[in-house]
Structure formats: C-alpha cells, structure tokens
C-alpha cells in the first residue's frame, strides 16, 4: 500500500486484496457512503467525470483498475488494451480519488471462486450480446466480484457503454444487491468524439474520421421528429457507409428492454452505433427521442 500526496489530496493505492481490505477498515467509518468507479485503466476525462460525480454524492470514492479477461471475446483486443498505470494514478491525484485498487487476477478469481450465474435473456442476445457471445456474462462476473470486494453504496458507469449499463442494472435487480447504479452521460471532446481508452490507438486522421458517429447520432435525433425508426436507421447507415469507417451495426432500441424499434417510437428511444476505424472498434449511442 502507498500514499500519494498532493497539495489537495492523498490517494491511497492498493495492489492486493489484503491491502485493499485493510485500508477500507482503517479509512472508512461505519455508515459511510462508498462510491465505486470500476475501470479497466487507460483513464481519460470520461473516467474523471465519473469520479467527480462520485465525489459529489459519496463520502469515500474507490476506483478499481482491472483488465478483465473474461469479457474479451477477441484475444487481440485483450492483448492490445492500453495499460497506463502511472498516468492513471496522476489523473486520480488531480481529481481527488480516495483509494485506487489494482487487483491481480487471483484477487478477483481465486481458485475457489464461483460466480452464481445469471440468465440475461434478451439483453444478452442483441447488439453486443449477439456479436460477442459470453461478453456480458464476463462483465457480470467481474462486476459482481468487484461489488463483493468493495461493498459500495453506489456504483458509477458511463452511458457510452449503454447496453453494459442496462445489463449491470439487471444484474443488481436480479441478485437484489443493495447498490444504487448511477448512469452518467457520455463524455466527449470539444468536437463530439466520445472519449474512450481505445482512442489512444487512433491516429489523428482516424479521430477526425470518427466524428461521423457523433454527426450521425445528432442528425438522427433531428430526423426522429418527423420519420419512423426504420427510416431514421436507414439514413444513419447510409451516412456511416459514405464515410471511411466500416459499419458493424446501427440499432434504435427501447432503452429498457433493448428491443429494436421499427415503426413506432417509445419514450427515450436510443440509437446505438458500432463501427471500425482501421482495427479500432468504436462504440457510441445517444437518446434520439424524448
């Protein structure tokens, strides 16, 4: 365990389950509101925004950094996932996070650990669930385990991964966990590009090309006033295909059930887009109907 001092804050770092649990007992009074921000590292302003939100509504803020192997269906994606531990700690020092936990694989998945299992139903059969079999089971497995280790009152997740937030909320309800999930709006740069750890792998030219995602979502929101979901989807697909990105899918979904919308709108309908810039997979979404 180490303490990192700044003029404003002390950030405690823990590198094992034992260090982490000892720190919690020493640092967190009984009855405190614990805010958890789970991450896979390579932190950016989007993560910083989650931590700031957690600080406003929690007594003690924990950030976990763990690249979870069970949610990667592409081994190249796992091996290429950026790791920037020193920069991550520096960012958290500036924000004022209380404790950052860098667990090892055997901290998360000891030999005797068994995830109780969960049937996600349709949530795991559409969009990311359909294209990445087993991905959301891996997400549930690691988030459930992190909840076991950290005992948060609240957990904060970015809506850039909209389907993931829906799955985690379902899991919390399914297991009746005493944790409040706080969805936080997608953080974007000043041109509209959704912030993502994978953006570190984009060239400057690809970052410019990727702006077509935000452009498409924004235009779709305007089109949704006068067109059906199917018509809006077709125009969005056409817009992406005219760009240099390789489109994987565009879907317009019910925000609760994730069922596809075709002829009729529902409240808070959301468009989800996935496309590739080179070999980097980009995900974005936006509520396009109030």
Image: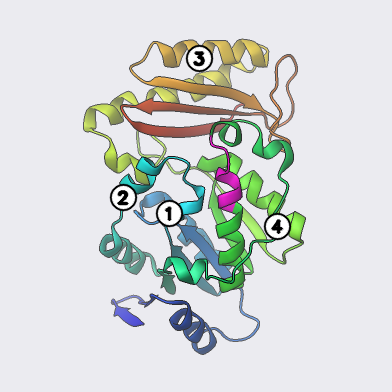
Element assignment for label 3: helix
Element assignment for label 1: helix
Q: CA distance from mark 3 to mark 2?
A: 30 Å
Magenta stretch: dominant SS? helix
Looking at the rendering, the stretch of residues picked out in magenta corresponds to 132-139
Q: Nearer the viewer, mark 1 or mark 4?
A: 4
Q: Earlier in the sequence, mark 1 or mark 2?
A: 1
Locate the N terminus and report the quarter of the image it occupies: bottom left
Q: CA distance from mark 3 to mark 4?
A: 34 Å
Residue 223 magenta: no
Return the residue at label 1: 47
Question: Looking at the image, how many numbered discs can be counted on the residues?
Answer: 4
Residue 133 magenta: yes
The residue sitting at 28% across, 65% down in the picture is: 90
Residue 19, how many percent across, how many down?
44, 82
Picture quarter containing residue 115?
bottom right
Residue 232, how many percent across, how many down?
59, 14
Return the residue at label 4: 172
Residue 175, how many percent across, how many down?
75, 60
Which numbered circle lies on residue 212?
none
Return the residue at label 2: 82
Q: Earlier in the sequence, mark 2 or mark 4?
A: 2
Q: Earlier in the sequence, mark 1 or mark 3?
A: 1
Q: Is residue 237 visible?
A: yes
Locate the C terminus and report the quarter of the image it occupies: top right
């Amino acid at each position: 365990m180490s303490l990192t001092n700044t003029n404003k804050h002390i950030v405690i770092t823990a590198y094992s389950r034992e260090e982490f649990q000892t720190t919690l007992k020493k640092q967190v009074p009984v009855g405190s509101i614990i805010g958890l921000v789970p991450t896979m590292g390579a932190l950016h302003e989007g993560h910083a925004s989650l931590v700031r939100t957690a600080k406003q509504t929690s007594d003690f803020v924990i950030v976990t950094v763990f690249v979870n192997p069970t949610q990667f269906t592409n081994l190249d994606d796992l091996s290429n996932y950026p790791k920037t531990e020193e920069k991550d700690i520096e960012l958290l020092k500036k924000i004022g996070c209380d404790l950052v936990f860098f667990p090892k694989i055997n901290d998360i998945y000891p030999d005797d650990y068994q995830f109780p299992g969960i049937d996600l139903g349709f949530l795991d059969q559409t969009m990311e669930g359909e294209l990445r079999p087993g991905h959301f089971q891996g997400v549930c497995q690691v988030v459930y385990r992190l909840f076991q280790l950290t005992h948060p009152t609240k957990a904060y997740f970015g809506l850039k991964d909209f389907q993931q937030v829906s799955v985690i909320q379902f899991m919390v309800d399914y297991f009746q966990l005493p944790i409040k999930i706080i969805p936080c709006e997608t953080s974007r740069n000043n041109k509209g590009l959704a912030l993502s750890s994978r953006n570190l792998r984009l060239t400057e030219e690809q970052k410019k090309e990727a702006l077509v995602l935000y452009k498409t979502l924004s235009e779709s929101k305007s089109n949704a006033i006068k067109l059906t979901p199917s018509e809006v989807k077709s125009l969005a697909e056409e817009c992406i295909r005219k760009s240099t990105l390789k489109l994987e899918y565009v879907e317009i979904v019910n925000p609760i059930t994730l069922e596809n919308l075709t002829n009729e709108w529902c409240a808070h309908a959301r468009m989800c887009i996935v496309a590739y810039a080179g070999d980097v997979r980009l995900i974005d979404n936006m509520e396009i109907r109030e």
